[in-house]
Amino acid sequence: MNADSKVIVVTGVCGGIGSAVAELLNESGYIVAGFDIDRNDSEVYEHHIVDVTNAEQVKKSLDLVFQKYGKINSLVNCAGILSTNNFYSENYSDWKKILNVNLDSVFICSKEIVDYLIKNEISNIINIASVSAFKQSVFSSVAYCASKAAIVGMSRTMAAQLAKDGVRVNNVAPGFVDTEMIELLSPEVIEKCKNSVPLGRVASPVEVAAAVRYLLSDDASYITGETININGGTFMS
Ligand SMILES: NC(=O)c1ccc[n+]([C@@H]2O[C@H](COP(=O)([O-])OP(=O)(O)OC[C@H]3O[C@@H](n4cnc5c(N)ncnc54)[C@H](O)[C@@H]3O)[C@@H](O)[C@H]2O)c1
């Protein structure tokens, strides 16, 4: 770490994609403050136990990060939960839970962090959406698909409204990624999913993390309001 290192808050940092993002950013010289309800001892990020659906907890940890480093440069919204309910079995309380964790958290974390971000010349908000935002899903619930589609919609308007303050807002939309999240699925469903992907395999979390690192970098300095799809060519099939 040096004085120029950028400070990035990554939510869902104990998960498969979040921890890959934290590792890759750490390797690239960023300081990572990881927020998660879970704990995972790691040397590559500073851990904060935070429920990202709770604005007070989010604010408290962001204040601590800012006090420690004197800046917060960007946010990666990665916390999320999957539900595989069929529409007929899903009830309103399942729907609310999924929307709360996957969508409200993106609003809450972005709202709480924005006053820190606009102190910088350039900063980023990157959301992990999903292929399910764009395509009917073989296994995800309608609530999950709605939460991810809403992220894509909200981030375009956020990108437009925050551009004047130098905040770029983009999404990364993965297909199937090899993390605990897809362990909810049966081996048969996973096999079916793999077979439906032109590249014939699931993604590794680091392939998603690489897109996050790119969007945070100056190489992506003219990109905002966009979504990078990491899905092995799924849209061709
Ligand atoms: N794995 C996939 O195939 C896949 C595909 C597309 C999109 N995604 C999205 O990528 C993101 C990361 O998923 P993953 O595959 O790493 O899953 P994961 O289950 O490995 O990780 C999710 C993390 O989010 C954390 N989390 C859940 N609720 C939280 C809360 N209220 N507050 C704080 N942390 C909370 C969990 O503790 C966990 O560490 C999610 O938004 C997911 O929807 C995953």
Image (cartoon, helix red, strand yellow):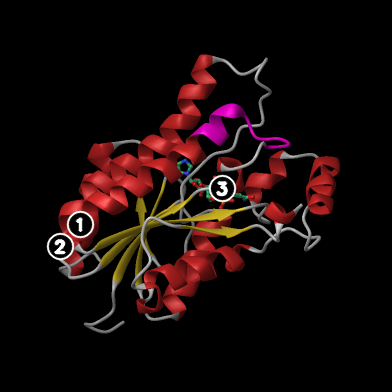
Can you give x and y, in whole percent of width and height, for residue 227 in the image? 48, 56
Which quarter of the figure is the N terminus placed in?
bottom left
**Earlier along the polypeptide chain: callout 3 or callout 1?**
1
Q: Secondary structure beneath disc 3?
A: loop
In the image, which disc is placed on residue 130?
3
Badge 2: residue crowd in 10 Å (few <14, some 14–19, many ≥20): few
User: Taking 82 as reference, is 222 left or right?
Assistant: left
Residue at the disc numbered 1? 64
Q: Vertical placement of 95 versus 132: above or below? A: above
| Mark pair 3, 1: CA separation | 31 Å
Magenta residue check for 183: no
Residue 43 in view in this figure: no
Q: Residue at x 20, y 57 (%)?
A: 64
Q: Residue at x 38, y 81 (%)?
A: 29
Q: In the depicted view, which residue is nearer to us: 33 or 90?
A: 90
Badge 1: residue crowd in 10 Å (few <14, some 14–19, many ≥20): few
